[in-house]
Image (tube, rainbow, N blue to C red):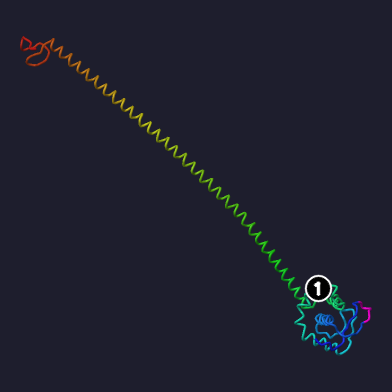
Amino acid sequence: MARSSEAITGSASPSSPISIRPWSPEEDAVLLRHALHCGTRQWGELGRSGQLKRNNKSCCNRYIFLRRKFVQRFQESLLREHLGGSAHPQLIAAERYHQLPRHTQQQQQQQQQQQQQQQQQQQQQQQQQQQQQQQQQPAAAAAAAAAAAAAAAAAAAAAAAAAAAAAAAAAAAAAAAAAAAAAAAAAAAAAAAAAAAAAAAAAAAAAAAAAAAAAAAAGWCGFTRVPVACSYFRWAVV
């Protein structure tokens, strides 16, 4: 890069004088940094202090040349630089007065806004998740309670069915016992009837035997066949 014009150097203090001497590579970077910070303004005062005054037309031409040719190339590298002991005093002063270029400030603001939006979105998502969890927890608890109630109802129904089955079995056993008792009573009645019939038969047999004995003792009439003295015959036929 040709050194065709004069450079502006000196301390960063507003009260210190400005000396003019040939440019160095470091001062080229200083000029370019100042061009980046000042934007479209001509080379002149530094920031708000008014320390650096306009020197000559060649300086302005140098600024215009640098701005047109090297701003795009040096922009990223210069923005990544950190101020340190090796930095030129004018560079330090320019950084102090101008901070960062406008487009860098806009980028930072945009990044901050994006970060804030992302944080807000994350917070909203977390809130939505918490609300969903809070909404789901009562529903899950209600579902669990309903399931427990249904299980209890099923257990009660099963117990009632078991009790009904036991009652039915007891009723069936009682009916069987009653039927057995009725059968026994019927058998006893039949036995009593048979005994009565046997007694009646025995009584009839005894009466027949007694009648036969009486007839044998009294004799029979040969004509009338009655156990009386025959009125027609004077003898009895046995």
**Magenta stretch?**
13-17
Give coordinates of residue 25: x percent, y percent.
83, 82
Q: Is residue 99 above or below residue 184?
A: below
Give coordinates of residue 94: x percent, y percent.
85, 78
Q: Is residue 199 left or right of residue 93?
A: left
As drawn, the residue found furthest toward the left would be 233
Residue drawn at the location 17% of the way across and 15% of the way down: 209
The residue labelled by disc 1 is 82
Residue 233 sits inside the magenta stretch: no
| Viewer-proximal residue among 134 and 116 | 116
Task: Please tell me whether the stretch drawn in magenta is mainly helix, strand or loop.
Answer: loop
Give coordinates of residue 238: x percent, y percent.
9, 12
Q: Is residue 177 above or below residue 232?
A: below
| Viewer-proximal residue among 220 and 82 | 82
Q: Is residue 189 above or below residue 29?
A: above
Residue drawn at the location 61% of the way across and 57% of the way down: 136
Q: Is residue 26 above or below residue 181?
A: below
In the picture, the quarter occupied by the N terminus is bottom right
